[in-house]
Structure formats: C-alpha cells, structure tokens
Amino acid sequence: MATEILMPALSPTMEEGTLAKWLVKEGDTVSSGDILAEIETDKATMEFEAVDEGTIGKILVAEGTEGVKVNDPIAVLLGDGESADDIADAGAKPAPRPAQTTAEEPAAAEPAAAKAPAPAPAAPAPSSDGRVFASPLARRIAADKGLDLGAIKGSGPHGRIVKADVEGATAGAKAAPAAAAPAASAPAAAAAGPSTDAVAKIYADREFTEVKLDGMRKTIAARLTEAKQSIPHFYLRRDIQLDALLKFRSELNKGLQSRGIKLSVNDFIIKASAIALQQVPAANAVWAGDRILQLAPSDVAVAVAIEGGLFTPVLKDAHQKTLSALSAEMKDLATRARERKLAPHEYLGGSFAISNLGMFGVDNFDAVINPPHGSILAVGAGVKKPIVNADGAVGVATVMSVTLSVDHRVIDGALGAEFLQAIKENLENPIAMLA
C-alpha cells in the first residue's frame, strides 16, 4: 500500500529543517539508496536516501519550504501496481515509512507534535532531582511566552519538552510569579530581550536592512546564550614563544614540499593540544549534567568560520596522528565545512576546542565554551615583542598570546593551569612532539 516518506532527523538535535531541493519528481521510480532530496539543517545541507523501492506518487512538501518538522510527511511512495489514484481512493492516510537519512546517522528524532487540538496536558513528572528536561530552543520560547515548563507535557524522548510542545501550550501553562516558584522547579530560562517590534521602533527613523536568521544563526544564538548563562567560565592567559616552532616548521615544510604538504602553525597547535590532553588526562573531560565524563582519546574540535556562522569539526584521536595527517584532515574538514557538507559525526563530540583568530590579526581574545566541552583555547597572532631572556638580557621573540576558557564545573584553576602549561611546553619544544 502507499506509504509516507517522513522528514528525517539528520542530527541528534534536529527538530526541523528546510527541504532545499528535490532530486526526484512525481512518477519517478526509486530504489533503496537512491538520493531523494537535499535537506538543510541548522548546520549542513545533507543528502536524503530512500529505504525501499517504489514510485514517487505525490510530493507533499515543495522544495524551498522552511521549518518542516522531523517526522512530518514530505512525500508518498507507491508500491507495485499502485497509482497516484490509489492515494485518494485509499480513504485513509498512507502508512508512514521512515527514510534513510545518511549512511552515518540513523533517523532517530523527537516525534512531531499532534496536529489536532487537545486539552492542556498534565505537567510531566520531574526527574529525581526536581529538574524538568527541555531542549534549549523550547526553554527560550517558553521564556519569550512567559510559560512555566513544569506545567507542559513533553512529547520528546523520555518526556523531554521540545519546540512543538511550548508553541502549542495554553494559557494554563503561564509561569507563576517568581516569589511563588518552588525551590525544585526547572532552572530559570534565559531572560527575554526586547521584542522585535520594540527594537524596530527605536530605529524607525533610521535606514536599515532586516536580515532574516537562518537555522544556523538561530542555533548559534541559542547555544551561545545558553553557554554564557549556564557555564561558569574562568580564563587563563599565557604568552608562548614561537621562534623554535617557526624554524622547525620551515625545515619540515622544505622536506614535505615534494609531497605537496605544507604545515601551518595551527596544525602544531592541534598536535600540541592533543598531546597535552594525554599529559593532563583530567582536563580531557566534558560536563554531562550531573557528572563529568573523562575521555581517553584526544578528540580536538577546531572552529572554522563559514558564511553566516561557524562549524567546529572534530579531529578524532589527534594525539595518534602525524602532523601531516592532521594537516590533510583539517584541510578536508574545513573545505567541506564551508560547503556545509559535514556529516553530524564529524562536528559533534570532542572535549576541547581551538579558536584561532590570530590569522586575522587579532592579538588576543576570550572564546566561549562550546558545551559540553570542558575548555576552549583562543589563539591570537604571533607578533615580534621584546622579551627578557633567562640570562637577564633583553631580546626579541615572536610571541603568541593564548587564552584558555575553562568550565569551572569540569576543570579547577590548578588543573587548568597545568593543562595550559603542557600546551605551552609542547609548542615551545616542537621536536619533542614527534618523539
């Protein structure tokens, strides 16, 4: 019988996406593994594969449609001997059929919200420690609407509150006055800023262009707000002398020139950080709600700027890879990041990240931790500076300023200082990194 093809979940956090382009049309015959469409998530444009064979009987969602919720029907697949007339004649909705999303990521998503109106649901049972589980986007919308998350029933996995739940919440879920809130209520949501209309009125007599937020920009805004409000950041700063590294890099690049390899300073920073995570294993950790997860491998994320946002692709097992292997992998990940062609497993994970703005001439800055990472290294430019040598003589060296932003829940001050010292020593003694 005719079956529905549903909007897939292309990443663990995806709740909706844009149907960017159909690669089939009504009447086309498809087989398992055929590419049906391109789907834009908040992070990437990914190909969407068919699971079964059949004929595309009807396309339900036009290409270019934004905000299509995960598990919403987007097309109808006909079986052997069926025609488009059978869709109308069936007298019932076609049976839903999930479709393969990518070879790397299974389609496991939060169910779509019910279409029909329903009475206001009872509040979900809180966890044993009194928390109510909700997605960051659901929390933000609830704050904007003045809703009490404790009075909303979640339709996500294990009762998790998702976007559709708060959008459909009734006035009965309005938040109680702060003074009456019980101590075990959900964590306070982010305070809402001024409304769109309020801001627009301020600039009503000034010329401006309104830039619509795409999925990536919305996600960046929500995650950074959550990160700064929920993560207790502290910052450690060091200056690192690069002259030995620059000389060593120049010698290596001469030998690698015939193989078409050119190592960057950033490649050395990745390697130095990966080794430091092994040297100080307690810093190789992430925050997991009510516990810390300490990782064994050094999985290092590196921020890559793209138009309209950024990615943090992850170099897994970086401590075990050569500089040339890390360089080649980083170039490949950065290229595909700018094309929005990364799969979720390539930008999720890691315990630590590097953000390098030195290549843009920035001397130093403080980076925001990307949860659930325990820390992030902000890298500034290497510049010539006067220094005092060990013998007391004044000299000149190429000095790079770095700042380690640390989640104090995961890494204490002394541990963070030890980790940063290990990174500094690795970079100032680059030959030792190859031992």
Image (tube, rainbow, N blue to C red):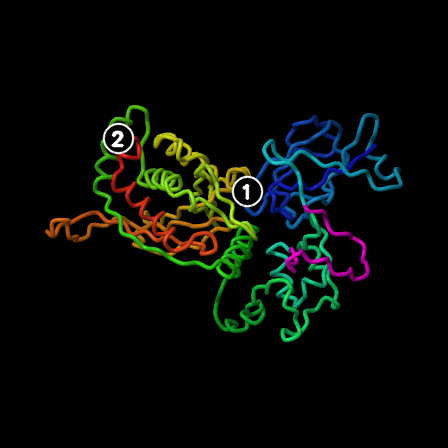
Relative to residue 294, is residue 331 depicted above or below? above
Q: Amino acid at mark 2?
A: Leu
Whether label 2 touches label 1, CB < 8 Å: no
Residue sitting at x 77%, y 34%: 57
Nearest the camera: 326 or 340?
A: 326
Numbered circle sitting on residue 220? none
Would you name the residue on which mark 2 appears?
Answer: 252
Nearest the camera: 25 or 15?
A: 15
Say left or right for 3 vs 398: right
Would you name the residue on which mark 1 appears?
Answer: 44
Crowding at dot 2, Cα within 10 Å, few <14 / some 14-19 / many 20+, comes out as some
Q: Main secondary structure of the magenta part?
A: loop
Say left or right for 330 vs 222: left
Crowding at dot 1, Cα within 10 Å, few <14 / some 14-19 / many 20+, comes out as many
Residue sitting at x 32%, y 44%: 422
For the C terminus, give its image quadrant: top left
Q: Is residue 119 magenta?
A: yes
**Dividing the picture into quarters, in which one does residue 102 lie?**
top right
For the N terminus, give its image quadrant: top right
